[in-house]
Each structure stands twice: as C-alpha cells, then as structure tokens.
Amino acid sequence: MPQPTHDRRARAQDDALDLHFIGNATVLLSYGPLTLLTDPNFLHRGQYAYLGYGLVSRRLTEPALDVGDLPRLDGIVLSHLHGDHWDRRARRHLDRTVPILTTPHAARRLKVAHGFHHTAGLRTWRSLTLQRDGRQVTVTALPGRHAGHPVLRGLLPPVMGSMLEFGPAGGLPRLRLYVSGDTLVHDALDEITDRFPAADLAFLHLGGTTLPGGFVVTMDGAQGAELARRLNPRLILPIHYGDYTVMRSPLSAFLAEADRIGLADRVVHCGHGERARVPCEPGAAPKVY
C-alpha cells in the first residue's frame, strides 16, 4: 500500500545532514538522531594551544559553542592529537564514554593517559560503524600527511582523513562526507577516488599553518583547491582557517583559487558559528543559516 504523500515529504526533509561550524576544525554533525563531533577544540580567544616541542599558538577566535553546550554525542571523529584539535577543555570535560574514532597513535594516548577507554584506533582504510535509532554512519580512515619534509613527519603526530557515510541502519549510504584532516596534497590521496564515489560534501582543513623555519603543514588556498579538483566532491566547505596565529593563508586565498579553476559554485559559504543543512537528495542545494 503506497505511503501518504505527506509522510514521504516529511521523511525526505529529515534525510539531510545538519552541521554547525563551531570553529577551527570543530563541526557538530546531526543526521536524524545520530550526532557526531569532529576535532573538538574549545579554547577561547587569547588562550594557547600546545602543538608539541615547546611550540604554542594563540587562538584568535571564539568557539561558537562551549564544550558544556554540546548535545549528547554518539561519537567523535578526531583527525590527530594536536592542541588545536583536541585541547585541554575537551580532555577535561568531554564524556569519557563517548566513542572516539581516531589514529592508532591518538587512541593509545587517549586510553592510557586520559582515560577515554571507548577510543578506536583506525588504520588507513579501516572502518567502524555507529548506529542510533535506525540511522548509521560508517567512518573509514583515509590517508593523510601533516608535513612534506621527512624530518617533520617524524615530529608531528600521525594524521588521518576520514570518509563518513550516512544512511539507514543496514542500508546503503545516502550521503558521503570527506574530512581531509590536517593533510598536505600528496599522491596517496588519489586512491580515495578509486575506493569511494565522489563525496557529496568535503570539509577541507586549510589555513596554511606555518611553523618556525617556514615549514607549511596544512593546505593553503592553492593546495585546498587542488585537492578539491582531484577528489571532485559535489560541495566544498572550507574549515580550519583564521583561528590561530600559525595560520597564514586566509580563506580568501582558497576562494580565489577555487574560482580560478571553476569550483566556486561548489563552495558552501558557512562561516564560523553558522549552520547548514545538506540534503541527501542528489543535486539539492544546501541551506546556510
């Protein structure tokens, strides 16, 4: 027996990914009853993030939410263990029973040193699925490289990108979200398109983070646009820019390069503190508010 038209419409309206850009690489994601958080960073303006080996960076922006304002979480996707992605406020105040999906390096530290025992370390191309009330997300760890110089690779923590596939529990994905993590563009990223259809939405970590000596360890505007060209997502949301003193490449650099190579119409202009709804319906336009 066919379902009433209003029921189908209500279900279609609910079949969307809602996001709240809290700041830096921290985004709150809701797919129906399922709620996730990426790279929790809740330091306030003027506070310092510890980046290792005595290096710190001052925050220039306020997070749109404090850690105490978060809703119930079904999981946290953590790209790597750096002070601007997992800070002392997250360590002290997040619920230690929430599953954290991250690199094996970060998982060991979070379990042993900080008591987050529900942490899973995912090696590249490994997946884990979370479910709630008929919805699910499968998170797959993807390649990432935080630095180009071989010496720096040994000093910076391992980083992962991730593919988040949202859909009905036990069913096929309805929306794919790529999260780059703090990676530079390198050839191993090309394998993502061999294993996954093009993402519906890509979160690109930008900022051109520059360490002493001039070493760039996150994508600047040109690299971000190049990665978008290679992976060919339907929509692009730039994040991780302008929040810390080590970030030297402004959002405008990415927007200009995206426009130059013909990707400007794919950019979702969702700034710090704003929300967006991305429908799962192919071709449907996102709404920013």
Image (tube, grey):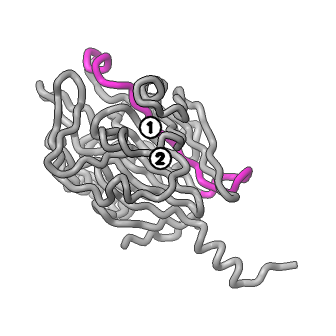
Q: Secondary structure at mark 1?
A: strand
On screen, residue 239 versus residue 211, left or right, reads: right
Vertical arrangement, residue 133 with respect to residue 226, above or below: below
Residue 282 makes an appearance in the image: no
- Amino acid type at circle 1 is Gly
Q: Secondary structure at mark 2?
A: strand
Q: Which of the two residues, 154 or 268, is positioned nearer the viewer here?
A: 154
Residue appearing at x 55%, y 35% in the figure: 118
Looking at the image, which residue sits at the far left?
213
On screen, residue 137 versus residue 267, left or right, reads: right
Residue 258 makes an appearance in the image: yes
On screen, residue 32 versus residue 226, left or right, reads: right
From the top left corner, tell me how far across and down residue 149 is, in percent: 26, 20
Vertical arrangement, residue 167 with respect to residue 145, above or below: below
Residue appearing at x 12%, y 27% in the figure: 212
Neighbours of disc 1 within 10 Å: few (<14), some (14-19), many (20+): many
From the top left corner, tell me how far across and down residue 203 is, in percent: 40, 50
Residue topped by disc 2 = 178
Q: Which of the two residues, 36 or 148, is positioned nearer the viewer here?
A: 36
Residue topped by disc 1 = 161
Vertical arrangement, residue 107 with respect to residue 258, above or below: above
Queried whether the magenta region covers residue 190, the answer comes back as: no
First in sequence: mark 2 or mark 1? 1
On screen, residue 2 versus residue 238, left or right, reads: right
- Amino acid type at circle 2 is Tyr
Residues tagged 2 and 1 counted as in contact (Cβ below 8 A)? yes
How far apart marks 2 and 1 lie (CA) works out to: 8 Å
Queried whether the magenta region covers residue 171, the answer comes back as: yes
The residue range painted magenta reads: 150-174
